[in-house]
């Protein structure tokens, strides 16, 4: 079974989460996991102004996603930073390339799942994921979240991202916070759960 993890990131928080999701998915026997990033649509001067040129180099080795990476997969797990409570424009632009897949029903019945990074705790942690689900539903995908059997969702001992809708990290308004172990473990759990459910569907 093939699982594609497709993310967008500027300052590497979502990239770090994507690697944790991939680790979780790879822990399931038979999972062939690929990690891809969407093409950046912001201009170089804009990336300079946002101080993202240096941080994007941290994951420059990750291949650029194509619609083939969607079509060939049995499950697709998307990761996006929030922008005003929604996915980023680069992720949206990639999804806008999928109209032929939609027309031919290529993603119908595949598993879809989403994880996120926000700057603040309540800056769109859940809305970014639930609004992303709209696109997955239009494609006929089967949405998988994170059930509360992952008790780290209920952790009140520290500030933590992650919800029933999907894993998440909180980058802090200045981007200084890194994904915590609690958040990374929820991300691994999500990857593993998607792989386990996909294995059952493929069988
Ligand atoms: C244009 C713009 C809009 C943003 N909107 C929000 C927002 O609505 N809520 C929030 O918590 N963070 C917001 N952020 C912060 C980003 O979500 C944060 O930088 C991102 O999660 C870091 O992920 P990355 O390191 O993978 O790029 C915004 C950032 C930018 C540049």
Image (cartoon, helix red, strand yellow):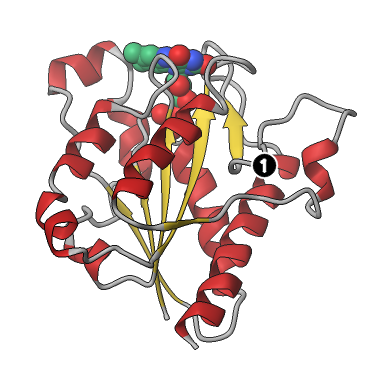
Residue found at the very far right of the displayed protein: 157
Q: Is residue 10 above or below residue 123?
A: below
Query: Which residue is depicted at the point 55% across and 55% down?
Result: 144
Give the percent coordinates (x, y) of residue 17. Answer: 53, 45
Left/right of residue 34 with respect to residue 16 in the rendered view: left
Indicate the quadrant of ligand 1 in the picture: top left
Toward the viewer: 168 or 129?
129
The residue where tag 1 is placed is 164
Give the percent coordinates (x, y) of residue 4. Answer: 37, 63
Give the percent coordinates (x, y) of residue 137. Answer: 37, 48
Toward the viewer: 13 or 130?
130
Residue 191 picture quarter: bottom right
Toward the viewer: 135 or 13?
135
Query: Which residue is depicted at the point 16% across and 50% down?
Result: 98
Q: Does the residue tagged 1 have its C-beta within 8 Å of any atom of ligand 1?
A: no
Q: How many marks?
A: 1
Query: Which residue is depicted at the point 73% across and 30% down?
Result: 160
Q: Residues within 10 Å of mark 1 (few under 14, many from 20)?
A: some
Residue found at the very far left of the displayed protein: 100
Say if residue 200 shows up in the picture. yes
Say if residue 39 shows up in the picture. no
Query: Which residue is depicted at the point 42% across and 81% down?
Result: 1
Left/right of residue 96 with respect to residue 197 in the rendered view: left
Residue 53 picture quarter: top left
Q: Is residue 177 above or below residue 188?
A: above
Give the percent coordinates (x, y) of residue 118. Answer: 52, 23
**Element class at badge 1:** loop
């Amino acid at each position: 079974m093939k699982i594609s993890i497709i993310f967008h990131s500027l300052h590497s928080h979502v990239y770090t989460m994507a690697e944790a999701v991939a680790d979780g998915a790879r822990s399931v026997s038979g999972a062939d996991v690929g990690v891809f990033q969407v093409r950046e649509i912001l201009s170089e001067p804009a990336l300079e102004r946002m101080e993202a040129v240096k941080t994007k180099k941290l994951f420059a080795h990750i291949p650029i996603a194509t619609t083939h990476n969607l079509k060939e997969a049995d499950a697709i797990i998307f990761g996006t930073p929030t922008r005003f409570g929604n996915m980023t424009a680069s992720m949206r632009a990639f999804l806008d390339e999928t109209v032929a897949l939609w027309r031919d029903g290529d993603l119908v019945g595949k598993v879809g799942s989403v994880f996120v990074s926000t700057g603040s705790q309540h800056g769109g942690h859940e809305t970014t994921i639930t609004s992303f689900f709209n696109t997955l539903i239009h494609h006929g995908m089967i949405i998988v979240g994170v059930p509360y059997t992952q008790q780290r969702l209920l952790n009140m001992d520290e500030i933590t991202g992650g919800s029933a809708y999907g894993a998440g990290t909180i980058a802090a308004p200045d981007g200084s916070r890194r994904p915590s172990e609690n958040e990374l473990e929820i991300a691994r759990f999500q990857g593993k759960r998607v792989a386990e459910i996909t294995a059952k569907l493929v069988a």
